[in-house]
Image: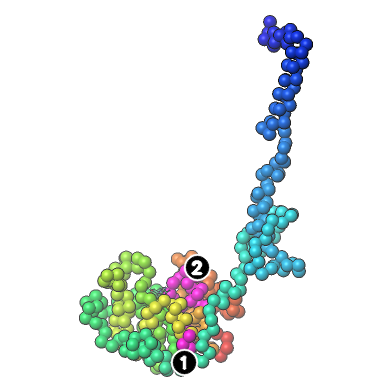
Amino acid sequence: MTTWKAKLMGVRGLGGPCRSLFIVAVLAYLLGVLTSPAFPTTRRFSDTDVKLQPFQQIISQQISPPETSQGAPAPTSQPLPQRTSTPPRIDDCRKQQQPPGYRMLPTDLITFHTECKKEAMAPEAARKFLIDELFDGVSPFESFPPKEVASLLQPERIKGWGSETTVFRRLMQEVRPRVMIELGSFLGASATHMGSIARELGLQTDIFCFDDFRGWPGFRSGDLADIKQRNGNVMLMNQFMQNVVHRNLTERILPVPFGTVSSLSSFCKWGIYADLIEVDASHDFHSAWSDINIAFQLLRPGGVMFGHDYKTAADKRGVRRAVDLFARLNDLRVEPDGQHWIYRSKNK
Ligand SMILES: C[S@@+](CC[C@H](N)C(=O)[O-])C[C@H]1O[C@@H](n2cnc3c(N)ncnc32)[C@H](O)[C@@H]1O
């Protein structure tokens, strides 16, 4: 006899009340199993509810641009849009002009500087003013080099990058600057080149060289290892000055040995404007962006600003992006010249 038949006969063999009790127990068990959340054939939630809802929520928060009642994008200072009742479809995402999560820069972020002094300092007064303000009234070239650094310097040690290309002579001839600012001078390759051109053209140009003279981390590895340092004090400014002395340009070139942004801000406060400004300090987007924004305020009407690294790939085009964005926002034309870029201020 098979097992199930024996069991059935066992149930049949039970007395009336016991059999009823047994049947009720079996029914109760079956009811419990069928209503359990773990029971596979029961759809307690729809698939859509469980799997898609969080995804839709994220997408709608990231890509739905806030809209005004006219359909124009709302000011970006508004809070991020909350989940919309109709989630966007993939088609809607493709129609977006901006990539997901990307927004226009709020325009107040680019006006991060106060206005420069309206009253410009007379150009011929600027050099003496700076010597008084920065060097206690004595030219830093006086009695240079001091004994303790002389043995650490070379008679001349120049190194530059595109520092003698034709753009320098072209712009010096065109602008004939009385005051010029260079952001990023290093050993003075471009500064001394422009100083020599000014002398050749008979110009009385003051070239103010903004540089913290720290270079960048690790710059002394490789072919610049011969630039000495003592107790962490690298001889960059001293060697720059030595190069200026060697080329007999101490009356035309003056170091401004501080960060570019703080130096520019001070020039702005003092009302020292320039006819020609060269930008060649840090090459990341943010540094180039702030240098360009503040420096442009210091340009005299009809002045020219230019810089290096517009067409070099090494910096992942950080400079180029800053140059192009500033031009777009200020309605300027970017004139490329080899690896250099040029802006011309509009008002003469
Ligand atoms: C590429 S080199 C300049 C080369 C120079 N124009 C030439 O052609 O010979 C960059 C210089 O910018 C300076 N520099 C970088 N960021 C700076 C900052 N934020 N403030 C001041 N100087 C900075 C470095 O110390 C370095 O000397």
Select label 2 or label 1 by which is in front: 1
Which of the two labelled residues, at mark 2 and mark 1, occupies the earlier sequence position? 1
Q: Can residue 198 be seen in this view?
A: no
State whether residue 89 is above or below residue 309. Answer: above
Ligand 1 image-quadrant field? bottom left
* Residue 274: assigned label: none
Q: Distance between the residues labelled 2 and 1?
A: 36 Å
SS at badge 2: loop
Quadrant location, the N terminus: top right
Give the residue type at disc 1.
Met
Q: Quadrant of residue 205?
A: bottom left
128 with respect to 119 (left or right): left
Magenta stretch bounds: 269-293
Residue at 45% x, 92% y is 123
Mark 2, residue position: 317
**Which residue is farthest front?**
17
Q: Alpha-carbon neighbours of circle 1 within 10 Å: few (<14), some, or many (≥20)?
A: some
Write the residue at 35% across / 65% down. 218
The amino acid type found where label 2 is placed reads Arg
Q: Residue 121 carries which label?
A: 1
- Say which of 124 and 304 sits in front: 124
Q: Where is residue 171 in the image (x, y as percent from the top left)?
A: 47, 85
Is 103 on the left or on the right of 284, as rendered? right
